[in-house]
Image (cartoon, rainbow, N blue to C red):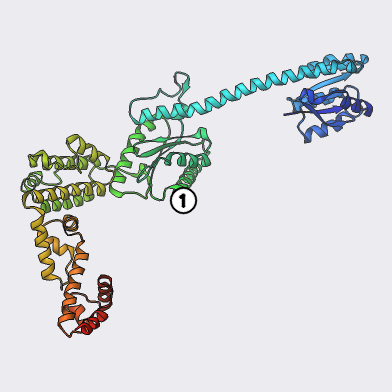
Amino acid sequence: MMKRVLLVDDEMIVRKGLRKLVEWEKFGMEVIADAPDGQAAWDILRQDEIDLVITDIRMPICDGIELLRKIKEYCPQTKVILLTCYSDFEYVQEALEIGASGYLLKTDMEDGKLEHVLGKLKREWERSEASQNVFEQMKLKVEQTLPLLYEKKMKQLLEQKYFPAKAGEQDGMLELDWFDSLQLLMVIELPSETGIALPRLENIFAKLLPREKWILFPLEEAFFVSARLPEQKSEQEGLEQQHKLLQSVWDMLKRDCFPQLNLYYGKSYNQASLLQKLPHLLKTREYCTFYHGFGAKVAVDMITLPEAPDGELIDLSQFKQLAILHQWNGIREQCRQLLHACREQKVPVRAVKSLFSEMVSIIMDSKQTSSLTLLHWGANQFDYVENIKEKRTLEELLQWFLTGIDQLEQRQTIYFSGVSKMIQDAVHFIEKNYFKEITLDDLSEHVGLSKSYVSSTFKKSVGLSFVDYLVRIRIEKAKELIAQTDLKIWEVAERVGFNDPKYFTKMFKRSMGISPRRFKNKLRHSS
């Protein structure tokens, strides 16, 4: 970038001569203005950024010494070179003491001495800029490194592996001032983390706060954020600032990236409160997500976590008997009771997961053969314990458990009686009751197996779903009635189980390719 030069002399010929005398570009400079006296020069300096002023000492209105004083007081970064005559030497020493970068006799300007002075200034600027670049790079590295160091130590705190020094002490070269400041702690939890979640979140916080004011990193299917808040004049001002920041974070998260999420937050004032708040923050997040799912903004300071229940939530001895006797519907009923008890008593998450782990273990032990091991739950105890730990909501945990029960029931049915008997029984039930308003629930109750198992097994064996097979049977019966009786079309529809004649016509045409009336007419013409 070119350095900007201002020429000041009361003689126009001197100013014009200076412009033409020097190849300013060679020194990385350009003359952007000139002035006939110190006052005019000062007016320019106040309006424009000047790097170098070359000025005569003796001038009317405001001389070079007075101009120099103003420059060093208000524009100390601006360099000043004085042009003098032999009779001006009495002022030179004063000028150098004030801060002039040098002086030059007007009689020496054509002897190359001005270029020498300009070359010296150019080298000084280059050295200064090089030093400034080094300083800026070091400053940038420090700014980039500090958040990483704070992040590392915060992670260690969250993992309970590190306890920071007392206030005022140092940890190596790093003062832990971050941990002794007012912080807004947040955990952002998403239903399912994606690879693009982290950069999106970083972009959101970069819009709200300077980079040195926040740290953000992934944390067990969630993201932890610490936002360092400035000191407030009053408690009310602090509350308003925090509310505004939280609302901005919430609105941007919901609008820009993540319509379904949980935001848990609390405040920390110093290291002592930080060590107290972090475990409570994480436990509250686990508890609230487990029972309430996603879509909430929760102040953890307002939440009191429950204690472990005194008695048993279900009768495990009865549960064991149900498992031994393969009473799967009885086990399902106990699960429904357990779900109700957990919600009513707000049982701690770990207690619920421990109970489900014990229930799976009881069922696995009751099988007494590895051939019936449930792949859905896992091949061994380590697998299903880990699977249970990963479940984030009570609904998710319960569904995982019941799916395993369905799978076990399916394998057990195949093992003891075979699928064919159940399918035959199901088909016979449909053919016997096709004209009634029967449902998959009715069929499931009739064969004594779960609805999900009956549905999947029926489709695998027959090739059609229960509904599609029922419709096919009804259409076949309708064809028989149309061919063998004089019933009206709407009467045929009612006889085979269709309450809506229009729907019957639609389904008949979908199956046969023609309407019932055309089918009837076609039969008459063929006979």
The part of the image, by quadrant, that contains residue 193 is top left
- Please state if 335 lies on the left or on the right of 367 as rendered: right
What is the total number of numbered labels drawn onto the structure image?
1
The residue shown at (11%, 38%) is 370
Q: Position of residue 113 (x, y in %)?
A: 85, 15
Q: Decide which of 158, 493 is in the foreground and name it.
A: 493
- SS assignment at label 1: helix
Q: Is residue 361 above or below residue 519?
A: above
Q: Is residue 317 above or below residue 105?
A: below
- Please state if 515 lies on the left or on the right of 30 as rendered: left
Q: Position of residue 483 (x, y in %)?
A: 17, 80
The amino acid marked with disc number 1 is Arg
Q: Position of residue 5 (x, y in %)?
A: 80, 28
Q: Is residue 219 above or below residue 412?
A: above
The residue shown at (45%, 18%) is 172
Mark 1, residue position: 255
